Amino acid sequence: MQLDVYTVNVIVAVAALTAAVMYLLETLLRQESRAGQLWALSYLCGILTVTAYLVWMGGDRHLVPIAVGNGALVGTIGCLWLGCLRHNGRRLLRPSLLVAAAALVVTAAVFLDGGAGDWAGAAVTFASVAVFAVLGAVESRRGRNGDTPETIGLTVVLAVAGLYYGARCGVLVVSGPESEVFRTWFDSSVTGLLTIVLLIVALVTTTTLRNNAVVFGEGSNELNLSGDGVLSARSFFVMVQRIVEVDREDERTVGVIAFRADDLPQIGIAFGASEQEAVLALCRQSLRRYAPAMSPIGELGPNGLAVAVEADSPSAVRRMASRIQRRMLDDLADRGTAVIPVIGLGVAIADTYGKDARALIRAAFDAAGRAATSLDASVVIAD
């Protein structure tokens, strides 16, 4: 069955709108990381892209919808790259200006190349998309992104987009839009079908990354403490770094106990944001109550917490974690509602990671994720 260009664009629009609504709905129900906000902006640009192209297809085919759609398309891929940069803790001022400038250049190119008709400004648009996609693919394999297995899907999406649009630009410039090669492999129908596949992979990947988003980067030594005695993620990192750098002569064990409840966003969707906030507040209160006195407690993303402890041995740290987990579940059960999240606690010992606080916190956080999905263990010790 052959699909005309308008039908393919409608299908792409439905796929893009569905992906964007799902992603943005979770954005409204949680305290979002900056990388997640940039990826949400990417989906918004995607909505603008398909809407502009549909207006162009269904109207008199003026240049304005093409210009808006092309600029938004560059913004879509550019924001994916910016999200990868932010996820790695990099500065965004210059890259953001570069994306904005490229979108403006692409938009202006449509009017300057108006004689090309439907493909006005296409070469500049394809080249810009290819460049930002390649930059995003490279950034997704660097730093913290490269250490996160979930980013492989995003790398594949951006790499395929970069190669495809690079080839599309080359064929358009060399052979023209009416050539057999371009019409067979790079026409709007083929691009639309590829976009649907890439959208699905990108949605799953960015959602997973956002759920696991925790700031472990270095920065200011200023400590930010919330009203219930919980440090921000960056402040907690600073505290843990100070603790592990102290040379101890009593050979006491330093460890990090991490807590995760990754299904809190689903609780928010099913029972409302107020119920989600109440459950998280109780978990924070329980951890504060049952953790050793004077132990620093910090946030790990929107659905995670951690506490740095000292004990006589690694087994003593594990016993602490088991006691916290049991009493936290008791507190949740005592609320008298059926809403109990799936929680996991992970333990990482400083002896294994030396004085690398970032690796120590990350190991505990990942172990908590494994504990939450394990049928055999409520507390997992990081390797």
Image (cartoon, rainbow, N blue to C red):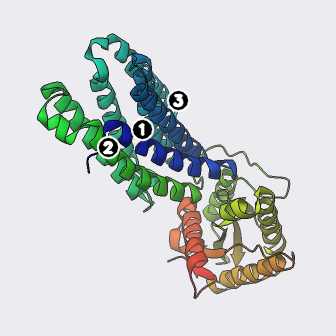
Q: State which quadrant residue 272 falls in.
A: bottom right
**Three-letter amino acid code at the position of disc 3:** Leu
The residue depicted at 84 percent of the width and 72 percent of the height is 289
Label 2 secondary element: helix
Residue 309 rendering spot, x and y as whole percentages: 71, 72
Q: State which quadrant residue 132 falls in.
A: top left
- Left/right placement of residue 190 relative to residue 286 reads left
- Distance, label 3 to label 2, CA atoms, is 24 Å
What label sits on residue 236 in the rendered view? none
Q: How many marks?
A: 3
Q: Looking at the image, is mark 1 or mark 3 nearer the viewer?
A: 1
C-beta proximity under 8 Å, tags 1 and 3: no
**Three-letter amino acid code at the position of disc 2:** Ala
Q: Nearer the viewer, residue 119 or 27?
A: 119
Q: What residue is pinned by disc 1?
A: 77
The residue depicted at 48 percent of the width and 46 percent of the height is 14
Vertical position of residue 333 compared to residue 100: above or below: below
Q: What residue is pinned by disc 2?
A: 161
Crowd class of label 2 (few under 14; some 14 to 19; many from 20; radius 10 Å): many
Counting residues from the N terminus, which is met first, the one under dot 3 or under dot 2? 3
- Distance, label 1 to label 3, CA atoms, is 17 Å
C-beta proximity under 8 Å, tags 2 and 1: yes
C-beta proximity under 8 Å, tags 3 and 2: no
Q: Nearer the viewer, residue 296 or 135?
A: 135
**Residue 372: in sight, yes or no?**
yes
Q: Nearer the viewer, residue 3 or 33?
A: 3
Q: What residue is pinned by disc 3?
A: 93
Crowd class of label 1 (few under 14; some 14 to 19; many from 20; radius 10 Å): many
Residue 6 rendering spot, x and y as whole percentages: 37, 36
- Left/right placement of residue 161 relative to residue 338 reads left
Vertical position of residue 263 compared to residue 91: above or below: below
